[in-house]
Amino acid sequence: MSRSREESALISRLEAVMGEFSQRGAGLVQPVRSVVPLQKHGGFLGLMPAYLAHEDILCTKMVAFYQREQGSSLPTTQATVLLFDPVSGVVSAVMDGEVITARRTAAVSAISAKLLMPRHAEILCLLGSGHQAVSHYEVFTQAFTFKEVRVWSRSKERAEEFARAAGGPVTVCPSVKEAVEGADVIVTATNASEPLLFGKWVKSGAHVAAVGACRPDWRELDDDLMRDAVVYVDSREGAAAESGDVILSGAEVFAELGEMINGSMPAQRDKTTVFKSLGMGIQDAVSAKLVYDKWKSQQ
Ligand SMILES: NC(=O)C1=CN([C@@H]2O[C@H](COP(=O)(O)OP(=O)(O)OC[C@H]3O[C@@H](n4cnc5c(N)ncnc54)[C@H](O)[C@@H]3O)[C@@H](O)[C@H]2O)C=CC1
Ligand SMILES: O=C([O-])C1=[NH+]CCC1
């Protein structure tokens, strides 16, 4: 299967499961991520189990994420995914979760952009130049056509490396402000714990896919942006427990991504929108199953 067909298959599986999740039916079990703080080391270990009864997928991901010192060579996010045979409880596969995490997160953001970005979006802006920025670049430029792609990173060298490695032209911007001004779609994929994207810089009607700041006291977006935008989340319970951008701004969550997908809430494409992504076990479960089924078919 070609990369773009794999990406489309992943996107349609994610759309289906997110839509189903937002109906809160009995066929889908996914508690809010439980997180063990590793205060001594500036890190967290998250446990993300999920059971999808219709497809009989039982899965859990364990993800460790850290706020590293600038210049550290250690990865900030590491994950392992376990798939089980739900009949017996036997583990059927242990998978590295890095690629799964990177690609499913970008694919979910692309679903939000498909529904919420301005109709004739021309400029994509990426804040951050790490793993998520790379996967978002790849998925977004495959799924949509932009006239310009911009990147900002707190390390100019890293941003330049990112631009060199990208499969097409990317403009390196010297500041967040210059990167985001006039952008139609903005992806925030940083390890910041203080706001770096300010509403006053964001074009009216733009769509922001906010991927970082996955702790209740971490921020990427300022209060103005959170309060002025229509806010969508992957899970209301997850956002209420884990999103500093939602909790500390006091912003109202308008809808879940899945509610837009299943038609129970509208996509307010003409307004400035934020999709606050935190990541969900069901996303890992359907992604891991796609990988496993492909591997099985090749045995
Ligand atoms: N929503 C979701 O489903 C997921 C979210 N994440 C989150 O996405 C974010 C990015 O993850 P990765 O790309 O894997 O990390 P990474 O370490 O590969 O890249 C992080 C980027 O953030 C930048 N950065 C670090 N501290 C910063 C600061 N204080 N201000 C501005 N920029 C800063 C780095 O220079 C780098 O460009 C993390 O917060 C991670 O926890 C990760 C996986 C899934
Ligand atoms: O969903 C995920 O894997 C993560 N969300 C925040 C850090 C890792």
Image: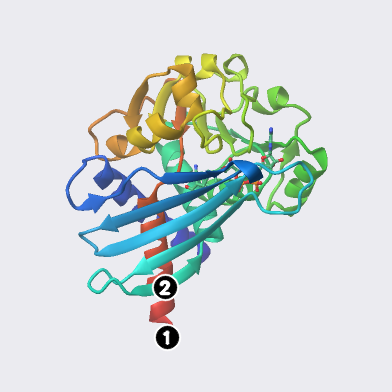
Name the residue carrying label 2.
Answer: 93
Tell me which residue sits at (47%, 49%) in the image. 46
Tell me which residue sits at (72%, 45%) in the image. 169
Residue extending farthest to the bottom is 299
Residue extending farthest to the right is 157
Looking at this view, is 43 or 104 the one in front?
Answer: 43
The crowd level at tag 2 (other Cα within 10 Å; few <14, some 14-19, many 20+) is some
**Res 132 seen here:** no
Residue 4 image offset from top left, x and y in percent: 49, 60
Mark 2 or 1 closer to N-term? 2
Residue 290, placed above or below residue 283: below
Residue type marked 1:
Gln
Its colouring scheme is: rainbow
Horizontal side of 168 relative to 252 (left or right) equals right
Residue 199 image offset from top left, x and y in percent: 57, 17
Residue type marked 2:
Ala
Tell me which residue sits at (65%, 45%) in the image. 41
Give how far apart the Cα atoms at labels 2 and 1 are.
Answer: 14 Å
Residue 180, placed above or below residue 40: above
Name the residue carrying label 1.
Answer: 299
**Res 263 seen here:** yes
Looking at this view, is 21 or 124 the one in front?
Answer: 21
Residue 296, placed above or below residue 197: below
The crowd level at tag 1 (other Cα within 10 Å; few <14, some 14-19, many 20+) is few
Tell me which residue sits at (58%, 48%) in the image. 65
Looking at this view, is 117 or 92 the one in front?
Answer: 92
Helix, strand, or loop for circle 2? strand
Residue 261 image offset from top left, x and y in percent: 30, 40
